[in-house]
Amino acid sequence: MTVKRDLLQTKGYASPNTFIRRETHLSYKIAIVEDDPDQRHNYATALEKQGYEISAYADRASAREAMSRAMPDLVVLDIILGNEIDAGFQLCRELLAIDASLPVLFLTERVDEIDKISGLRLGAWDYQPKPVSLGFLVERIASLLRLKALRDDPAPTTRPTRETGHLSIDEDAMQIHWRQQLLELTITEFRLIAALARRPGYPVAYEALMQATIQQYVTRNTINTHMRNIRRKFCALDNAFTCIGNEYGHGYRWVQEN
Amino acid sequence: MKIGSRIIGPRLGSKLLLAGCVLLFIPWLGLQSLRAMQQFLTDGQAEAQLLTASGIAALLHGRRELFDDNPSSPSQLAELPLYPLSGHILLDGFAEDWQGLEQHSQQYGEAAGPQFSLILGENKQRIYGLLKIHDTTPVYRHPAYLRLDHSDHVRFYFKDADNNEGRLLITFEGSGKITAYAVDEDWRIATPGNPDYRLQGYVDIDEGGYSIEFSLPLSMLGEQRQLGLAVADVVDPQQRTIAHISRTFPQINQGDYNRVLIRSVATEAIIQGLEKEEAQIWIFDHALRVRAIAGGLVDKTEDYLNAEEQRAIPLWQSFIDAILGQLVGASNQQLKDFDPLQTLSRDDALLHTAMAGLGSTQRRTSLDGRHEIIAAAQPIRDGDKVIGVVLIEQSTATILSLQRHSLQHIALLSLLSLSAIVIVLLLFSARLTWRITRLGSDTDKASDKWGRMQQSVDIRGTHAGDEIGDLSRNIEQLLARLTRYQQFLSAIPRTLRHEINNPLNTAATSLEHLQSEGGEKTYIDSAQRGLQRISAIVDSLAEAASLEDALNSDEILPINLSALLSTYVKNQSKRCPLNIELTTPDDDVWIQGSDIHIEQLLDKLFDNAVDFANPNTSIEISLRAMKNHCFIRVKNYGPTIAEAELLELFQLFHSRRNLRHTDNGEQHLGLGLYIARLICERHGGDLRVENLSAEGAVAFIAKLALTSSEQK
């Protein structure tokens, strides 16, 4: 039943409307490391249509060699490359050693929680399990590049930060502060908190939260896992954090502080 | 023992004990060899007795004079038998101390005269006598008369050591001690006037007459040992004349009296030195009259001591005696083989054989019937003529007591060794049984009731070097292999998901390109749906496979189950077409657990209930708390579950729904109730289902452990 509901709700995110041609980003160079030629080709084609300059590699050695000569603006990494099961992690480590501010997006079939945590700990900006929709990929890459631009060259924000109690959400920088402290969040986590805090006190259904992730196949379990991770991150900053409440049988809600 | 409907054989311990019963042959074999030994020993004893008898016979060889009757006695009168008395006789006129001998008294007297009976015995060189006179009108001595024959009286005739005639007269004035006087030839006046105290006695008078018990030294009689008795009866107390006289010898005699028959002193003196304990030596003459006896088969120990000892014997001792007596034929009782009648003559077949010139042995039971006696007889010869017989009788008591001791020894040793063996066997079997039972329970614990291997399998007793140790090791290896295989199996869905995600991604991204390039929308959409379904299946499988890890890694927090359930039902009511009724107790119910998984559990149960509910019925959810557990009951009105399906219901990949039943795009892999069960078990309870056929309903009951007092 859960599965059924999830499937129904995620249908919309595979719609072609999300995969539209945007304004070109000629200045951005994106490297794709993926051993499967079909997927590599599909990614490259989709991103080239967005106007990015794409260089695609099939294995760690060639990618490492080419990128050490000219660093791209963003890297999309698969973790298993050929026979090397941890090639993506290794490459990520090597690239970040060269340029610590390089946005790395893991796009992998390794969907276990432990792999995700390992990837993010290495310093990757985001971690996306396969299968992924190209629309989502384009959107996600755009966000990361925008974020990178903002961080490289802080400009006056176009949108004001939203304040809800001690929570402040910077939509442009995709940053969230809790009691003036910055939370280290993935983009999905940022989106979930933003969706919750949009109407504080009101329950947000699982379906809405699934939409907020703009991922292709999302289950309630995925949402629950995200929520648990988010709570842990808040609690790491503030032991007394209780603002995310379960709405059993429905979803979650942002509980306003007294 | 019965297990289910199957009857199984005895347990290991019982079998070992049964096998141990073979050990009971050991005491039996011991007993058999003892019996053989007894036979051997008694044969040996008989031989020895025969040899001894030959020796004695040789000693008496040719001693004709010892067996001849006194040649100087021409008397043809009846002999007075003199029975050897085993005990002292108290002179009191009563027959009790005569040991039944009085029944063998000889009767004297004719119809006219006084009738009397007489028995004579000998003990310690004294002659004892019991005289019973039938006289209803006794006439007592009158103290005024000097003459002694004016009252009833008894006359003693004898020949003294000098072969002179002696006369003693007993008269009395009533019951009491008697006085004997030597009298003149006419039996009238006491010659010295003083009583003769060598003859002592006592008279007892009753209605039938009077009895006199008397004693006199054997030495009073001379070599010829002649003794005669006469009873004179005075009838008229006025006239006081003698009416009749009855005698033990004929009235007309030539100064000869009855000869007292006594064993040969000379012969007895010879064999006295050969006396043996518990053995009796008899010498018979050619008429098989006893000439001499030495020793005796009567225990010489004083009865007083024996009685004391017997009183002191505890009950168990007499019980053991009884058993041993049965086994060996021996008795701890004192031997009594004394028949006074036999002390004069015997008539055994053995003796006749010996008289015919053949030495032989014989066994017989003692007269008290409790002992076995071996008798050996040898003829005594004088030239070619057999003049007598030597008979040696000895009880087998010595051998039997030897055997008895051996048997006691064997019995004790057997008992001790048997007990030790039985104890060792019992301990051993208990240990074996315990090890096997432990192995069984360890093996049993290795998997849960659903057949899934436990995380940590601990088989104990794998260090033992014996077969059970081998078995333990084999089982441990087997379980380890099973665990590895199970790990492999449970890893399959995850591996599958990893592997399938790549082609899925290829297909999905390619479809998107097709879509953006204006492909046929209908086909693209249906391909998309297919991909989504594959993705969902793979996700569900992986979720089920990794659920346990997820459950174990979850944070365990106190949950207010009542509040959670209320919220859940409130939220579900908004979207569910059916009516939901919730019953919760007044007090909050708290459990320790993961709220997300409790929510997942409720989802599974609720979805299941909704799917099988008849239209326009309500779903009834209730929460009930008991002492240690609470129960969430989800009931829907709809088709009941087939009995055969009940057991399978909570297994992986079991679905009540038709797998192809996908008209609304649903996919049922039979994971829901399996996951629900795992969640219940993780929360210290279980999940079960009840068919409520009467109401046409099905209820699923999730049991969860309450927060215990210490957790609070």
Image (tube, helix red, strand yellow):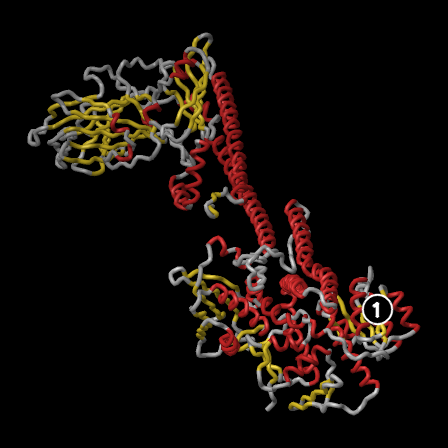
Provide residue B193's location: percent of width, then percent of height: 22, 33
Give the answer, above or below, for where B357 lies relative to B130. Answer: above
User: On screen, A61 above or below B195?
Assistant: below
Q: Callout 1, which amino acid?
A: Gln
Dividing the image into 4 quarters, which one contains the C terminus of chain B? bottom right
State the residue position of label 1.
Answer: A90
Q: Which residue does the image show at 54% across and 38% down from the upper left?
A: B19
How crowded pointer 1 is (Cα within 10 Å; few <14, some 14-19, many 20+) is rated as: some
* Residue at the spot 16% in from the left edge and 37% down from the top edge: B174
Report the residue that reaches farthest toward the right: A69
Residue B212 location, quadrant: top left
Give the x, y percent position of residue B538: 66, 62
**Residue B5 place in picture, x, y as percent:** 45, 45
> Measured from the top left, where is residue B590 in percent x and y?
52, 76
- Which chain letter matches label 1? A
- Classify residue B324 by image quadrant: top left
Query: In this rendering, does residue B542 appear at all?
Result: no
Q: Nearer the viewer, residue B369 or A48?
A: A48
Q: Residue furthest left?
A: B238
Circle 1: element type: helix
Q: Residue at x 40, y 35 (%)?
A: B334
